[in-house]
Image (cartoon, coloured by chain):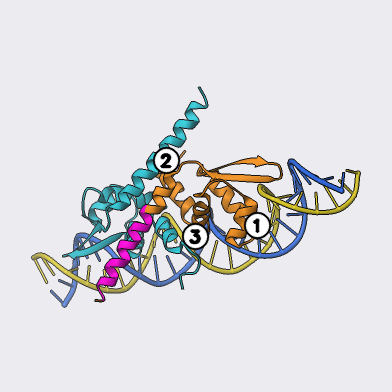
Chain colours: A cyan, B orange, C blue, D yellow
Amino acid sequence: MPGPKYTYEAELFKAISHPTRIEILKILQEGEKCVCDIVPALGMEQSNVSRHLGLLKKEGILSSRKDGLKMIYRVEDRRVFELLDTAREILRKYWEERREMLL
Amino acid sequence: MPGPKYTYEAELFKAISHPTRIEILKILQEGEKCVCDIVPALGMEQSNVSRHLGLLKKEGILSSRKDGLKMIYRVEDRRVFELLDTAREILRKYWEERREMLL
DNA sequence: CGTTTATATGTTCATTTACTCATATTGTAA
DNA sequence: TTACAATATGAGTAAATGAACATATAAACG
């Protein structure tokens, strides 16, 4: 079964723990988008992007629907953006403290 | 240099993306603790725990001070607990939705 | 039908991760 | 000093990850 405590939380964080996947989430913050829009926005291999999207979907962070040839992805729970915002604040404070140590 | 956007955010999430490290954070939510308290609470190899602590410290999530033979660790920014709480809420909703699909 | 477009997947490879065991380091005490 | 206690680190290994390239699938269109 799941094994150690916090396995699910760890999986969720792991899904977000990649620059490309975070960038995907940021792109989808505006609203749902097809792969054909996401790939050029990221400027990387389509197959690579597809795998990252698949991972985020497998972890329940994204959902998808088909529209003709296109596959449209969207963020399932907007609280993932809270995660991103909080992380940014933590980092900002971290750097701020280190900057002040040099003054 | 850092390379792609969101490298730092990704590193922060990656540091948290492990069941043992999340459990360490939960243990330290009560307050600072020495390794000698953390190891038995986790029930795993001391060397293993030490590495996870070192990782969390390297990423700026923990800080440490020495007290005689003991090394005391503590969480630097309590907003990491917001991350954990938000993650749990996201998961709770996720499971709740799936449960309702079976009714 | 065959062709084109959008997306997913198989395979290979190099890198990273997490773990274990043994050893090193550091501080304390007899 | 020697011995011990707490913690960190080196080395080895198995597994997971991410990237690239080629190929497969699926839907639309002529």
The residue where tag 3 is placed is: B19
Chain bearing mark 3: B
Which residue is at 49% across, 50% downward?
A: B15
Q: Is residue A37 above or below residue D28?
A: above
The three-letter code of the residue at mark 2 reads: Ile
Q: Can I make out residue B95 in this image?
A: yes
Q: Residue A18: horizontal and vertical position, in percent?
A: 41, 52
Residue B46's disc is 1
Pick whichever, A43 or B102, lies toward us.
B102
Q: Is residue A43 above or below residue B48?
A: above
Residues tagged by mark 1 and mark 2 found on one chain of the structure: no
Bounds of the magenta span? Answer: B86-102
Which residue is at 42% across, 40% downward?
A: A90
Residue A90's disc is 2
Q: Residue D7: horizontal and vertical position, in percent?
A: 66, 49
Distance of mark 2 from mark 3, alpha carbons? 21 Å
Chain bearing mark 2: A
Q: Is residue B88 above or below residue C25?
A: below
The three-letter code of the residue at mark 1 reads: Gln
Which residue is at 33% across, 58% downward?
A: B90
Residue A89 sits inside the magenta stretch: no
